[in-house]
């Protein structure tokens, strides 16, 4: 044993020295610079060939076109897309925003299987009700399953299996962010209406209808805060309960021309409803008799008060103060995660350039180095030094700054790419880096303004950037 321990110690010492040496490198970011030339992105890989947008017969829209153009998504098969690295980063940020709000009201995150057994869906009678929208399959034992579009049955069974739930544990709020599946008759508009997508779905269990309504309002308020943080205007409308069922339902809609939902909004009060939820063709507000106007929206959130529809048939109950079993009152609450991403691009972007909600931009800052062979190339290290200094001085920007090192391209061409991708801040080491002290050009996507700043000035300027 002794013979092994000595080299072990030696190795440990050497290893510590190694770590010590390299941690300082790491700290300065030298070995970890994010270089555009290294990104996996179709526009990087194949400069001109376009992206498959024209290949399929699906209807397209602005967000889909922009996301394809910027190499954010790649069509895989009908209504299914590869989410490429930039998209995944934006989505992870969105999930962080959602997690924070769901957990601040008591939500607990779970992760349920995508495969749900047909027998469960037969109990709720939705196996037949959903018809062709449900992706169905059989395992090797000939047992039927579906790829779940939603999890009311699964979560209710999960809770029902915990037979000893006490009233003290309620409200119970379980949620997940997972892939959902729907065999859309006409997948279209990219991530807005796909066959495989991410959804946040929360299911709540309460002691009474009154308590369930309080929970309903709690979750609705959390949704409001999410859209406010993202800077997205929304309308909350009365909605049809559809195949989910239940007693009451609202949708969160983002007004947009491309929207597939027709909304009626009162010009005099706050009344708003999905046309589907209105009885007949009303033209006057049922609350104040004011005039209703129609507009289009993209549904990004849906809330339901379910009552006991699922808990009764699947036996989800709790023990009350007298230790008697009582059927729980339920709610369910969905947010279309991938749809929110695409819808925000649809709504905020120009015809040519993506604009993200600030919090969700995949990277906050892009630094463009001088072109190879230009006079400014003499000071090319300035861009890299600025990169390292930014990350050192502003820890919140760690992992948020990329360096466009494709110095064989003109600054103009790289700025155009940066604008397509929608970095909130683009810092250019252009002609004025030859001045003393060097001056950088900072262009801000969200207000279209350009400012000229020294390195110190750039640091100050980016000090308050918020990152999800
Ligand atoms: Zn009204």
Image (cartoon, rainbow, N blue to C red):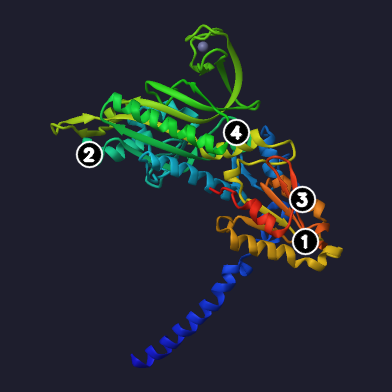
Q: Work out whether mark 2 precedes mark 4 in sequence or the reverse, and give the earlier one.
A: 2
With respect to residue 380, does 280 lie above or below? above
Q: Which residue is mark 4?
A: 187
CA distance for labels 1 and 3: 19 Å
Q: Which residue is mark 1?
A: 438
In which quadrant of the rendered view does residue 164 lie? Answer: top left
Looking at the rendered structure, the secondary structure element under dot 3 is helix
Residue 401 is situated, as x and y percent measured from the top left of the image, at 64, 56
Q: Is residue 49 visible?
A: no
Q: Work out whether mark 3 precedes mark 2 in sequence or the reverse, and give the earlier one.
A: 2
Looking at the rendered structure, the secondary structure element under dot 1 is loop
Residue 414 is situated, as x and y percent measured from the top left of the image, at 77, 53
CA distance for labels 2 and 4: 41 Å
CA distance for labels 2 and 1: 66 Å
Q: Which residue is mark 2?
A: 165
Q: Residue drawn 46% across and 20% down?
A: 240
Residue 350 is situated, as x and y percent measured from the top left of the image, at 72, 36
Which of label 1 and label 3 is nearer to you?
A: 1
With respect to residue 442, does 407 lie above or below? below
Kindly identify which numbered label has been placed on residue 256: none
In which quadrant of the rendered view does residue 324 lie? Answer: top left
Q: Residue drawn 53% across and 38% down?
A: 229
Q: Residues within 10 Å of mark 4 (few under 14, many from 20)?
A: many
Which of label 3 and label 4 is nearer to you?
A: 3
Q: Which residue is mark 3?
A: 415
Q: Residues within 10 Å of mark 2 (few under 14, many from 20)?
A: some
| Of 193 and 346, the residue lying toward us | 346
| Of 26 and 416, the residue lying toward us | 26
């Amino acid at each position: 044993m002794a013979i092994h321990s000595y080299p072990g110690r030696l190795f440990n010492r050497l290893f510590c020295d190694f770590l010590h040496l390299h941690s300082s490198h790491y700290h300065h970011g030298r070995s970890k610079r994010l270089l555009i030339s290294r990104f996996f992105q179709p526009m990087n890989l194949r400069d001109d060939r376009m992206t498959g947008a024209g290949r399929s017969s699906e209807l397209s829209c602005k967000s889909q076109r922009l996301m394809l153009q910027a190499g954010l998504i790649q069509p895989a098969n009908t209504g299914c897309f590869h989410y490429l690295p930039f998209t995944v980063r934006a989505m992870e940020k969105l999930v962080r925003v959602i997690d924070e709000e769901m957990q601040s009201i008591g939500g607990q995150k779970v992760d349920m299987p995508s495969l749900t057994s047909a027998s469960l869906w037969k109990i709720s009678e939705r196996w037949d009700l959903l018809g062709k929208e449900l992706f169905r399959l059989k395992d090797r034992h000939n047992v039927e399953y579906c790829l779940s579009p939603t999890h009311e049955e699964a979560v209710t069974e999960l809770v029902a299996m915990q037979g000893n739930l006490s009233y003290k544990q309620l409200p119970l709020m379980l949620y997940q962010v997972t892939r959902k599946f729907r065999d859309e008759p006409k997948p279209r508009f990219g991530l807005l209406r796909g066959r495989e997508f991410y959804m946040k779905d929360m299911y709540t269990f309460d002691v009474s209808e009154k308590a369930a309504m309080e929970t309903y309002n709690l979750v609705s308020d959390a949704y409001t805060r999410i859209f406010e943080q993202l800077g997205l205007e929304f309308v909350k409308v009365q909605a049809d309960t559809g195949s989910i069922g239940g007693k009451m339902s609202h949708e969160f809609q983002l007004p947009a021309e491309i929207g597939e939902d027709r909304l009626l909004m009162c010009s005099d009060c706050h009344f708003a409803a999905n046309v589907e939820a209105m009885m007949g063709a009303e033209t006057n507000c049922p609350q104040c008799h004011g005039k209703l106007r129609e507009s289009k929206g993209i549904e990004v959130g849906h809330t339901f008060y379910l009552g006991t529809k699922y808990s009764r048939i699947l036996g989800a109950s709790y023990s009350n103060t007298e230790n008697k079993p009582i059927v729980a009152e339920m709610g369910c609450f969905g947010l279309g995660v991938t749809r929110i991403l695409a819808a925000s691009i649809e709504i905020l972007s120009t015809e040519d350039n993506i604009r993200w909600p600030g919090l969700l931009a995949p990277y906050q800052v892009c630094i463009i180095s001088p072109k190879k062979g230009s006079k400014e190339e003499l000071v090319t290290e300035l861009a890299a030094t600025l990169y390292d200094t930014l990350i050192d001085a502003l820890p919140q920007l760690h992992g948020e700054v990329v360096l466009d090192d494709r110095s064989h391209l003109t600054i103009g061409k790289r700025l155009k790419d940066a604008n397509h991708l929608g970095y909130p801040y683009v810092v250019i080491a252009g002609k004025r880096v030859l001045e003393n002290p060097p001056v950088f050009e900072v262009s801000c996507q969200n207000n279209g303004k350009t400012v000229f700043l020294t390195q110190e000035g750039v640091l100050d300027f980016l000090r308050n950037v918020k990152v999800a």
